[in-house]
Image (cartoon, rainbow, N blue to C red):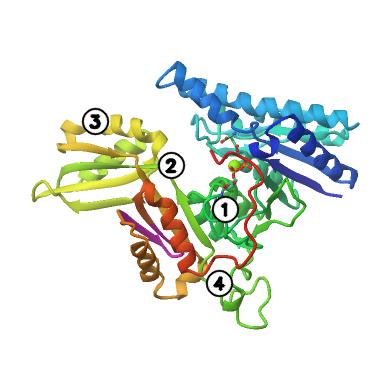
Amino acid sequence: MGIVVQKYGGSSLADADAIKRVARRIVDIKKAGHDVVVAVSAMGDTTDDLLDLANGVSPLPPAREMDMLLTAGERISMALVAMAISDLGFTARSFTGSQAGVITDSVHGKAKIIDVTPGRITQAIGEGHIVIVAGFQGVSADTKEITTLGRGGTDTTAVALAAALEADVCEIYTDVDGVFTADPRIVPSARKLDTVSYEEMLELAACGAKILHLRCVEYGRRYGIPIHVRSSFSQLEGTRVSNDARPDAQPDLQPTGTTQGDTMEQPIIAGVAHDRSEAKITVVGVPDKVGEAARIFEALADAQINLDMIVQNVSAAATSLTDISFTLPRTDGQSAMSALARIQAEVGYDKLLYDDKIGKVSLIGAGMRSHPGITSKFFGALASAGVNIGMISTSEIRISVIVDEASVDDAVRATHTAFDLDADEVEAVVYGGSGR
Ligand code: ADP
Ligand code: ASP
Ligand code: MG
């Protein structure tokens, strides 16, 4: 039988008992006759604890050393899972990302996988072993340094392994039963989606639904790997992410007789996502001349900073000046401010403002393309909940707004209810994890 690739998140590996439970699940698949390759995350909140530790030692730790530190978390898990498997009478071989052949570019902290050369994995499988791979890490082809893929990156390790090994499916085991119409920690009445398209899942992940790492969904779509998101705490079927359209979210919106895969009429909304990891920078008083915006964004690109929303307004300070605001990951806030400070004299702007008390709320659904009135309903729901909108951006299948960080939960709940996404009875179960 084929190769099964699985991923277990930190919440599924929180302590020794949890690790033994996961080992039993892995062994069950092996007993059923499959070859098994497992990507593991660091135990519980280990990565956050290591980050806190690093920040306690140094306010701006070197990126290379940060990656050396953080990859230790996954190494602990891989060895412990392999030990627990061996205790059940099966042999497992654990490999670091580098040993497993996960080759990345050289950007510390957010490296991209550029190739997977799984020679040692296939050899170990051939010898009858279960293979455990430390997630979220690789080695740079150029610098030979150890890299990490960014927070949540073990999902991407798993899908990249599934693609390289030509696995039939990649199972992502986590602490909820699948992908829901909103984060069940904020909306207990959120509904589980049985299926979701790569396209919608990409938007959900990009907008902060941390149930899946964005690049794992990109990878899955590029290589046609179906992703099955499910709980390691239950035996329930989870959510299948694939090319199929989503027939399940609001069955009443389906024309009768449609089947899974029909794209004739899709339920409008897949879900509401939120993100508290962004900050906003405003460059105040930029001379309104050709080339100024290009210079600003070139400086940010040189500092390897990914921007999200960008807005340019007539400056509140004076005419012939503009204010440029943009959002970016909070973790890049300080380097962006430094990069911009360096070009102040050259650009001639007035000052910089930094705000990290913001949140982003996004409404996502492929059916939006063909349904007018979604924006007005969304903004109406926010207004009724007393939530002020700071910035707006849209794609074909998404509307996002920036709001005060303190209003995020209210905004998500109000939007979820306004679009009739609340389940009638069953409350979504959150089995573990601190939500950190
Ligand atoms: P793991 O440790 O398994 O990687 P994560 O904490 O990274 O788990 O991701 C799972 C969490 O994602 C859930 O506990 C939930 O709080 C959060 N989440 C956010 N949005 C969603 C969503 N739309 N559906 C399900 N879970 C979501
Ligand atoms: N341990 C890493 C993190 O916490 C990677 C992962 O869990 O996927 O972000
Ligand atoms: Mg995760």
Magenta span contains residue 180? no
The residue that label 1 is drawn on is 184
- The crowding category of the residue bearing disc 2, from other C-alpha atoms within 10 Å (few below 14, some 14 to 19, many at least 20), is some
- Asked if the residues shown at circle 1 and circle 4 are in contact, with their CB atoms under 8 angstroms apart, the answer is no
**Is the magenta region chiefly helix, strand or loop?**
strand
- Asked if the residues shown at circle 1 and circle 2 are in contact, with their CB atoms under 8 angstroms apart, the answer is no
Residue 289, image x, y percentages: 15, 48
The residue that label 3 is drawn on is 341
Residue found at x 56% / y 73%: 266
Mark closest to the chain's N terminus, 4 or 3: 4
Q: Report how far apart the C-alphas of labels 3 and 2 lie in the structure.
A: 23 Å
Q: Amino acid at mark 1?
A: Pro
Tag shown at residue 277: 2
Q: Is mark 2 within 8 Å of ligand 2?
A: no
Please give the range of residues in magenta: 391-400
Q: Amino acid at mark 4?
A: Pro
Tag shown at residue 267: 4
Mark closest to the chain's N terminus, 2 or 4: 4
